[in-house]
């Protein structure tokens, strides 16, 4: 495991707080009928290697306006979707028994994607990790951003819970998810994030096929990038570095002036960091 803090050449962390979303590139939107559910997705298409963006629990497939054009212009086929019960996606006929990783794999089958890079934010990281454990042959690389990863180790779980006392759950969602620097610097960005969060809805519970333990992480085959914000209240840098020590062939990056929504708060640093990582993991 290696650890790094981005330098200013990766993007100015002060200026980045007020970066507006760039215009999107052309994409196809649709609703994939997977048999047991229907999921809303978007797909930039093209011949490039697929990068699948897995959204946090607070959002939906709409949460990537900064990544869609940047990743597509870098030559990738960029895909995201809303999980069950969230923006434009159905809960399905088996909402209490399904596995979220199966939905991802079924969608990839629907879109004729065999191998792909996974970029999972927060709860999306749980699903990406679950797929990487069960189907290492499908995952070219794994980015887990601001994610607690569903790790079930007792000491790890207790420590994270101790960081969030009961009063934490009563805080406004933007205080829990967005860092103070971003909230101070970009009120309009906060308002847009809240709008997308509110219309995302509440998804079905995410069930994992695998128990995420230290031995499971030690056997992880996919090259893994771990990212968090220096002001993330859910998975602070100290905790993420502990996880990084358990994963072979992994790298830890701490993004300055960012909370739990690093792809939204510091998109230039996030995009550059992820693209630099996956560029060396693509076939050919």
Image (cartoon, grey):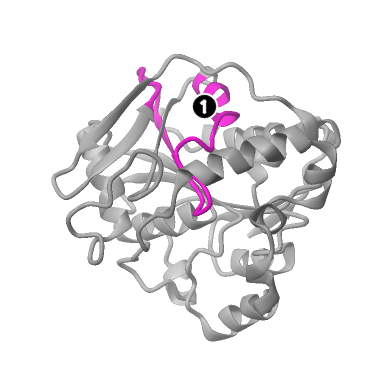
Q: Residue at x 65, y 24 (%)?
A: 21
Q: Quadrant of the N terminus?
A: bottom right
Q: Which residue is drawn at 66% across and 32% down?
A: 272
As drawn, the residue found furthest toward the left would be 35
Measured from the top left, where is residue 46 in percent x and y?
A: 36, 17
Residue behind mark 1: 68
- Label 1 packing within 10 angstroms: few (<14), some (14-19), many (20+): many
Closest to the observer: 90 or 147?
A: 90
Q: Name the main secondary structure of what is drawn in magenta.
A: loop
Tell whether 134 sits left or right of 147. left
Is residue 193 covered in magenta? no
**Regarding mark 1 in the picture, which secondary structure is present there?**
helix
Task: Say whether residue 102 is visible.
Answer: yes
Tell whether 113 sits left or right of 232. left
Question: Where is 105 relative to 221, above or below?
Answer: above
Closest to the observer: 202 or 260?
A: 202
Magenta span covers which residues? 43-72
Q: Residue at x 66, y 54 (%)?
A: 177
Question: Where is 67 relative to 53, above or below?
Answer: above
Q: In which quarter of the image is residue 167?
A: bottom right
Q: In which quarter of the image is residue 44?
A: top left
| Number of numbered callouts drawn | 1
Closest to the observer: 284 or 154?
A: 154
């Amino acid at each position: 495991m290696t650890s790094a803090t981005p330098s200013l050449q990766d993007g100015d962390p002060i200026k980045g707080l007020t970066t507006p979303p760039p215009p999107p590139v052309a994409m196809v939107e649709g609703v994939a009928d997977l048999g047991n559910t229907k999921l809303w997705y978007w797909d930039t298409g093209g011949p490039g290697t697929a990068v699948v963006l897995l959204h946090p629990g607070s959002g939906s497939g709409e949460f990537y306006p900064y990544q869609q054009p940047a990743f597509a212009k870098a030559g990738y086929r960029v895909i995201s979707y809303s999980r069950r019960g969230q923006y434009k996606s159905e809960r399905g006929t088996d909402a209490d028994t399904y596995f979220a990783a199966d939905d991802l794999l079924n969608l990839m089958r629907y879109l004729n994607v065999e191998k792909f890079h996974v970029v999972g934010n927060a709860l999306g990281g749980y699903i990406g990790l679950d797929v990487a454990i069960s189907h290492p042959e499908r995952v070219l690389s794994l980015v887990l951003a601001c994610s607690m990863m569903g790790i079930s180790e007792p000491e790890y779980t207790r420590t994270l819970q101790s960081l969030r006392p009961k009063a934490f759950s009563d805080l406004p969602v933007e205080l829990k998810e967005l860092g103070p620097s971003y909230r101070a610097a970009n009120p309009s960005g906060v308002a847009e994030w809240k709008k997308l969060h509110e219309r995302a809805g509440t998804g079905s519970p995410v069930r994992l096929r695998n128990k995420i333990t230290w031995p499971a992480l030690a056997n992880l085959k996919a090259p893994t990038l771990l990212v968090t914000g220096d002001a993330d209240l859910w998975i602070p840098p100290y905790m993420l570095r502990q996880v990084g020590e358990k994963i072979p062939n992994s790298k830890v990056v701490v993004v300055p002036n960012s909370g739990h929504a690093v792809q939204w708060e510091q998109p230039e640093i996030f995009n550059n960091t992820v693209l630099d990582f996956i560029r060396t993991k693509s076939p050919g």
